[in-house]
Image (spheres, rainbow, N blue to C red):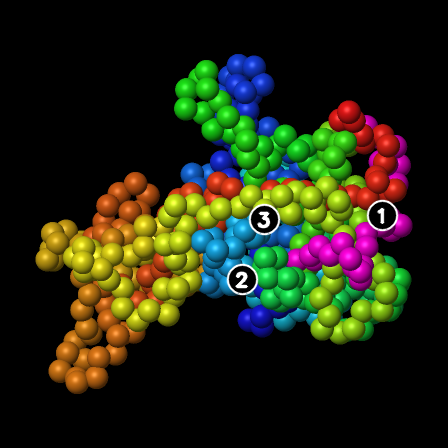
Amino acid sequence: RSHDLFDPEIVIQIVDRQYHNYVREQYDGNEPEEMTGDEWIIEHYFWGSNCVRSEHEANQVEAIIPGYGMLANMHPGLVNIDIFGGDYFDSAGLHRGSDPGAGAFSTLYGMKWRSLSHIPAGMELFANYGDGYFDRDDLSFVPISTDYEEADTVLNKYWELVKGNIHTSYAQDLWNLTYSSIQSERIRNAIPENIEDAMQARDYGTAMHSVPNVIRSKEWLEENGQCLDNIRPGSSTIKQAGRGAFATRTLKQGAVISPAPLLHIHRDSLVMCGSQTKQYVQCESEQLFLNYCFGHRDSSLLLYPYAPAVNFINHKSESPNAYIRWSDRSHHHADWENRTVEDILSEPYAGLALEFVALRDISGGEEVFIDYGRGWEEAWNGHVEEWEAGPYDANYVPPSEFYKDLVVHTAVEQKSSPYPWNIMTTCFVAEYGDEYTGPYGRQHRWVQTPSLFVYSYDEHECKVLLRERLDEYRSSSIRPLQNDLYTAQVMMHGKRLIISHIPRQAIGFVDRRYHSDQFITNAFRHEIDIPDDIFPTAWKDQEE
């Protein structure tokens, strides 16, 4: 319980998708009826922006966690891992004022997972999507966490009434009456109808009983599983790449470095459009997400790979040590290679998969590279040649520079010593005490709550008004700055509140909306090329 799991992950954001789809319809000459997001497969993999500290990036943020955040399913009664919060902003040493690679990869890095309970060897990992994930008509029958708890209570009460003997007519009649009287479909679906099965569920718990193969043997895993820890992230040996993927052990030539299931999307879904007037629409940029996709110059189909650390594998055209191929495993439907792009995009589930394979022996600790293709390399070289920093880029300061500051400047202090133009202060506030009258009128006292710093549900824009010492330190000659308390004006759910007694650790720094690296206007954008010799002819719907 409470063990850190896996290597840190990145978070890749898709911003303002509904708005861009709406404007793109205008660009294409259509008259959109309302601003809604079209249905696409990635929607089922999105994490809420407030789970991954992305609330303040844009007006609408949908987040992808490409490793375990996409591989892990959810079982409401068996959740055993969850996101563990941290400081995610990491530009990998690149600065937009001097590096053409800035803005070409996600700076949200460092998201961690933590075990919530003892996890037996071989047990499937279940992430916490939240019970709200099942508040949909097509999932209304699925038991949620409280249903399994109630189901366990029903079985235990029944067991007490029959005193452990289910082989009597009384016990059978009582069971029939008990089961038929359960009104909730979800609770009823958590309990086996057969009395013997129900008592077995009581022994293991209804949640565990609902997934008979939730714990797999070592032999089964060796035969059916694939290794996901052959690579891990680190600082790339290519500076402008930011981070890279490094072998955790010696990998022999021909070994599968990592599988990579693929999500299929249309490349138009990643086009970003701006509109000053109804008659003047520009669609000249793409989402950062594009840089992590595979594609082909003659196709509208993009394929997004997800597995731990595969999104860190960088490009090297000369002497790469790895390559991609189509998987021969059951989760790759080879028949899709003969289907049209339109057919594939209509599928509601992932059915394609690549594998990263060692081209030669790779030593432990060596960075893994594939060839992104000539189209990608030409686009990158052209970007570097033409790149110029923006007029304000040299003065940009990433939020991470302020994480360790012991003192947060008040609004008055910022008049003479302001924070950089891109920086916004935030306050973590979930609950607050009763209203009282203070120096700033009606105020509330800050209250510590469980899991306050894990998610960013409760991270709000704030303006620091006052900094003061704790009473027990007022006469001390040593100023314990980290123990100072703050009073701030906090924007919470559309209201401005004055919150006092905020500790330093509850104050953070983020980029203001639309000011992080992914919004650099001339940031590099290009998909990774799938080689011609393995790209299906049936998918070439944009051949010149």
Callouts 3 and 1 close, C-beta under 8 Å: no
- Disc 3/disc 2 C-alpha distance (Å): 18 Å
Region of the chain picked out in magenta, as a range: 312-341
Image quadrant containing the N terminus? bottom right
517 with respect to 538 (left or right):
left
Residue 388 at x, y percent in the picture: 49, 46
- Mark 1 — residue? 326
Q: Secondary structure at mark 3?
A: helix
Q: Classify mark 2: residues with Cα within 10 Å, few (<14), some (14-19) or many (20+).
A: some
Residue 70 at x, y percent in the picture: 65, 51
Lower sequence index among marks 3 and 1? 1
- Disc 3/disc 1 C-alpha distance (Å): 32 Å
Q: Tell which of 134 and 426 is nearer to you.
A: 426
- Mark 2 — residue? 92
- Of tags 3 and 1, which is closer to the observer? 3
- Disc 2/disc 1 C-alpha distance (Å): 31 Å
Residue 242 at x, y percent in the picture: 58, 59
